[in-house]
Amino acid sequence: MIPRIAALALALTLLSGCATISTPSPNARGIPVGDAARTGPPDSPIQVTVFIDFANRLMETAFTTVGALQERTPEPLFVVYKHRPRLRGSREVALHRQSAIAAIAATRQGKFRSFLSHLRGQIKPGSIPPSDVLLKSASEAGLNMVRFNRDLSDPLIPVQLNADEAVAIDWSVGQAPQILLNGRSIPTNPDAAGAALAREWGLVTMLRESGVPSAHISPLLSQLHRSAPPASARNSKPRPKPQDPTIHPVHWSEAHLALGASEKDTLVTLVVFVDYQCPFCLRHETTLEALRKEHPGDLRVVYRHHPLPMHKNAHHASAAALAAQELGQGAAYHARLTETARPVVGRGADPMDTLEKIASDLGLDIPLFRAAMKRHAPRVQNDRDESRKRFGVSGTPFTFINGKAIRGAVEISILNETIQEELKRARVIAKRQGLSGRALYRVLVGSR
């Protein structure tokens, strides 16, 4: 088990372009649940932990965001509610804690969500619920009021509240509200949180296809996220470009799809090694599309193939993309394979139904398509072997900008920095030597 987890940790590091993270323990544990209110299946691969303070004016936004995540998720999430009332810097500490204690008492009767719903309807954002409002909310939620009032003075509830506080400190949670997605803090804005959820499902898909049981994924990802440096530490210094100074003579053939500027006009060529079953390649495609629009007359993107061993259907998808390119529908077929946040070819046993349906939708002759796939299967393997042995490609996406290697689905600013450098270099060489097109590219990458 340990070698597999070590490999997965390395894969996540390489594929995401993140800072180096430590190898997780084979007994990785996520955020402890304890007696907290929760909803959804405990074995979900994604645990959403919400740290709440009823008196915080941003709490309503956080609740809205959690609701949006539950609507957008392709599978049910395990949502856990923990309390983080303001404990210092407030003259009304007792009232902050009183609201949390009332919520825990409601949780004991299985009425947390109902209590929360009634409470939210009776207080203004940022106001501290007075005792009478708490009691009214409990009554309207259908709680046993004798038990509720007794639990309000139960000395064990403050103990649970202190336990939530300890968890918050242990997981670097500051002031509530704060939402953790498998241990990683995400924005309380619904759109930004939704994007974070889509990325997390991409990681889940990769781990599932690597053989990790769904019930083990949330603890594993929680430990991986936890071991990464916090955003403040990552941003305290300029982030180094994830590239080496070597210029690699990476070439391609007419069989490969090329999008963007014409070969004659191109000054900067990006050769991207992709795996159509890799969620990070799908995310990277959005960045590449933005770059093509930003540099319409100077930049060209060429797609080569590096199906990873853990993605059993990726080789077929690459062969299908090459077949469609031969039959005149390469760009459209590539767009269909990359149009969603999750791989079109999943982890099913046979992807051919999906691949042939796309071909049929694009008007391709299926017998010709199948024959072309067989012809291009060796080319896919050749792409993978050459990229691994000659150029050191070990994960996807892997981008070469005029031969300069950049690993992972990095931010557009990192790619643009190298592109701007290469535009200057290419213009100087093109003017000095009177070169363009493939001849210019050969000089730029140091091959004759």
Image (spheres, rainbow, N blue to C red):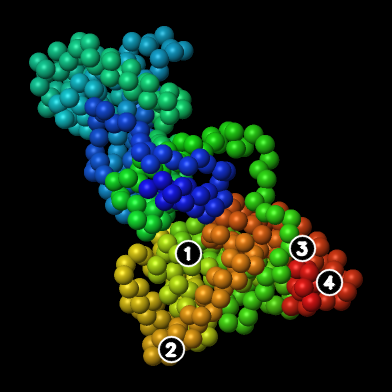
Mark 3: amino acid? Leu
Q: CA distance from mark 3 to mark 4?
A: 10 Å
Q: Secondary structure at mark 2?
A: helix
Q: Nearer the viewer, mark 2 or mark 1?
A: 1
Image coordinates of residue 152 in percent, x first then y, are 20, 14
| Residue labelled with disc 2 | 371
Q: Image quadrant of residue 367?
A: bottom left
| Residue labelled with disc 4 | 430
At 46% from the left and 12% from the top, the residue drawn is 89
Specify the label residue 186 is tagged with.
none
Mark 4: amino acid? Ala
Image coordinates of residue 111 in percent, x first then y, are 17, 30
| Residue labelled with disc 3 | 423
Specify the label residue 308 is tagged with.
1
Q: Image quadrant of residue 440?
A: bottom right
| Badge 3 vs badge 2, beta-carbon distance below 8 Å | no
Image coordinates of residue 85 in percent, x first then y, are 37, 20
Q: CA distance from mark 2 to mark 4?
A: 41 Å
Q: CA distance from mark 1 to mark 4?
A: 37 Å
| Badge 1 vs badge 4, beta-carbon distance below 8 Å | no
The crowd level at tag 1 (other Cα within 10 Å; few <14, some 14-19, many 20+) is: some
Earlier sequence position, callout 2 versus callout 1: 1
Earlier sequence position, callout 3 versus callout 1: 1
Mark 2: amino acid? Ala
| Badge 3 vs badge 4, beta-carbon distance below 8 Å | no
Image coordinates of residue 383 in percent, x first then y, are 57, 73
Q: CA distance from mark 3 to mark 1?
A: 32 Å
Mark 1: amino acid? Leu
Q: Nearer the viewer, mark 3 or mark 1?
A: 1
At 26% from the left and 28% from the top, the residue drawn is 34
